[in-house]
Image (cartoon, coloured by chain):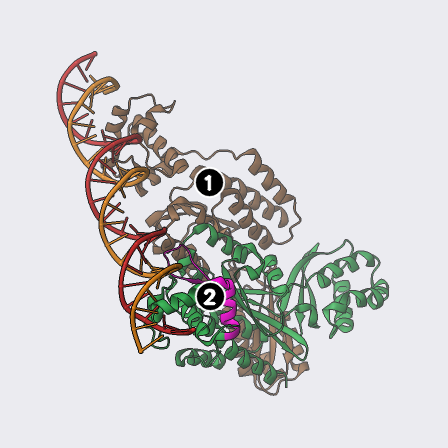
Chain colours: A green, B brown, C orange, D red
Amino acid sequence: MLSERQRMILNAIVDDYIRSAEPVGSRSISKRSDVAFSPATIRNEMADLEELGLLEQPHTSAGRVPSIKGYRYYVDHLIQVGGIGEQDMRKIRGFFAEKMILWEEVIGHAATILSQLTNYTSIVLGPETFQATLKHFQLVPINESSAVAIIVTSTGHVEHRTVSIPEGIGMDDIQKIVNLLNHKLSGIPFIKVKSVLHSEIGKELSRIVDSCEQILDVLETTLAEKTEPKVYLSGTTNILTQPEFKDLGKVKDILDMLDETPKLLRLFHSVPEGIQVRIGTENAMEAINQCSLITATFSFEGQSLGSIGILGPTRMDYVKVLSLLDYLSKDMSSWYAKQHK
Amino acid sequence: MLSERQRMILNAIVDDYIRSAEPVGSRSISKRSDVAFSPATIRNEMADLEELGLLEQPHTSAGRVPSIKGYRYYVDHLIQVGGIGEQDMRKIRGFFAEKMILWEEVIGHAATILSQLTNYTSIVLGPETFQATLKHFQLVPINESSAVAIIVTSTGHVEHRTVSIPEGIGMDDIQKIVNLLNHKLSGIPFIKVKSVLHSEIGKELSRIVDSCEQILDVLETTLAEKTEPKVYLSGTTNILTQPEFKDLGKVKDILDMLDETPKLLRLFHSVPEGIQVRIGTENAMEAINQCSLITATFSFEGQSLGSIGILGPTRMDYVKVLSLLDYLSKDMSSWYAKQHK
DNA sequence: ATTAGCACTCAACCACATTGAGTGCTAACG
DNA sequence: CGTTAGCACTCAATGTGGTTGAGTGCTAAT
């Protein structure tokens, strides 16, 4: 357990370091109005805090830098998430004043807003589509042998892919198939589509056309394959403005990771409900071991609606980001609730 | 007019510089088997070439570096675009062996292949959709007041956006409208959609529903607004591997530009038919004044099919990129022709 | 016309001293 | 006994001066 004074000093050091990105010395802490002790006293405390693993020294004659454990303590016990600035508030107001119809639009634009307000990178995952239900299915023939399959989900998400049409299927056959599918599959969650396809649709399909095996195959890969949520990125290059990332190699690793959707999905796969902070090596992904990731998830009546992440240096402005995220996510949730009341 | 020897020397210098990224001295040129002159002679020629504005000196006691004019001469008169490597050829073969149905898939994947083979950034613009015709139109209601509009073009491109449904329009009205539009607009080029909407559809629409003004408005913005081609990017972070871009500021400018679709569109707006090279400041876009952009456009029977761009440092391997682009674009064109024969 | 020779230039590199922000320790102080 | 002033110490950062070497331009000889 830390003494009150130790907490004060740790708080001061982390605050200072977040602002300056430079090791913090005892003298500069002692000058702060809220810490009225001499540098010597503070040095003693700092030595103790270092022994506890909360601070680190780049080299003997430098100031102290928060360790990951230090940031963790700071985030868990020292900060308090408060209101947000006048400016930011106005910007968010403006954001919600825009006319948005789909949840995906809200969550997508939220990425942009957040990266602008924080100057960090924002990563947003759309709703997990396998929880949604099928709203509409359409096959649009492009030429004799291929067509574009279009899927619309209950969340308003539109997905499309190309499919080959097996030999000997005519235009009217396609229309019949589409009608059948829309009739049978509307309102069915994606997660159940595969089984319904086999149990109910197989038989009916064989009545319409001969080569029903092939078609079932195509439909299955088309309808069941799609489970990846959409990823929105904003402010990817903001990392380049952070002084700790002047090393091009690391920056490339991070940017490369952001380019790879599967990696991002894996990164978000394990985040729990609500707002969470992952600092440095807590992230388990090599490339962002020098970064912190703050995530917020959204859900409504047990259905996951997607998640937002802010990626910045470990030295990120936790108070600001957490406050913003707190504020914004409440607005977003109420937007959704209102839309679905 | 340059002498034969001057051409040889200029060629040698540019070649060397492209490989090494370091100023080229007279001695290293003289050592090349194809330039059998003493360093002194070469120095004299280099002085002349500098006076002509084809070479530059970073400082008095450094070697020479090609100027933009130098690269221009090199590209226009010295290189010859030849065959491509065994490896590359195999990769491209593998690429065309994949099953692709839509032109958009071909052109999109081409971006990936090119950035992998060249280690530069590739930018691909899909077909200009306003030249395409409307294949299919659909309105899928999401809730009482809004719907998702889906547009499929003759090129297989799928576009969607959300629309609000005016008060007092029922489900069956929507179905009627969709049927009418599909009937009247199928096969109409997008560029003409607006006028057809007014001349033919307005009247018919008023027979179906009352508040036809409002609906026309919505349809117009939905159908006519969309003219932007899709942009595919690949290998954006490859710039970070180039030694000349160790300056983070410049890199950020370039990456930021790549993130902004409108800027990219403007950049491509002025490129002519065929393959073209733009070196350094010839690009007119501040951020890429230190880059070269090689573009290739595709078309078939007068219809534009999109364009490919390779963005690299001015010191890029013009021979390789031009050869690759030449080879690949022929394959792509023949793919398209075969598909539409 | 070509080239060997030579004086000259200048970025890059290294060794060394200087500086100053920061530390830990000890002894004095209230 | 907790706090603090004082002091010796450390070390990255910065500056200085010398050396090196790759490169040049010019001149005179071939």
Q: Residues within 10 Å of mark 1 (few under 14, many from 20)?
A: many
Badge 1 element = helix
Q: Which residue is mark 1?
A: B322
The answer to whether the residue labelled 2 contacts the one labelled 1, judged by CB atoms less than 8 Å apart, is no
The chain identifier of the residue carrying mark 1 reads: B
Note whether A11 is above or below B117 in the view shown.
below
Q: Position of residue B51 (x, y in %)?
A: 22, 36
Quarter in which the C terminus of chain A is drawn:
bottom right
Q: Position of residue A258 (x, y in %)?
A: 53, 58
Check residue A264 for magenta coloring. no
Q: Position of residue B311 (x, y in %)?
A: 44, 49
Q: Residue at x 61, y 58 (%)?
A: A262
Check residue A56 for magenta coloring. yes
Say which amino acid is labelled 1.
Answer: Leu
Q: Which mark is residue A49?
A: 2
Q: For the residues tagged 2 and 1, is the chain the same? A: no
Q: Residue at x 58, y 75 (%)?
A: A103
Query: Is A85 positioned to the left or the right of B96 in the image?
Result: left
Note whether A289 is above or below A321 in the view shown.
above
Residue B72: image quadrant is top left
Residue A172: image quadrant is bottom right
Magenta-drawn segment: A51-77
The chain identifier of the residue carrying mark 2 reads: A
Q: Residues within 10 Å of mark 2 (few under 14, many from 20)?
A: many
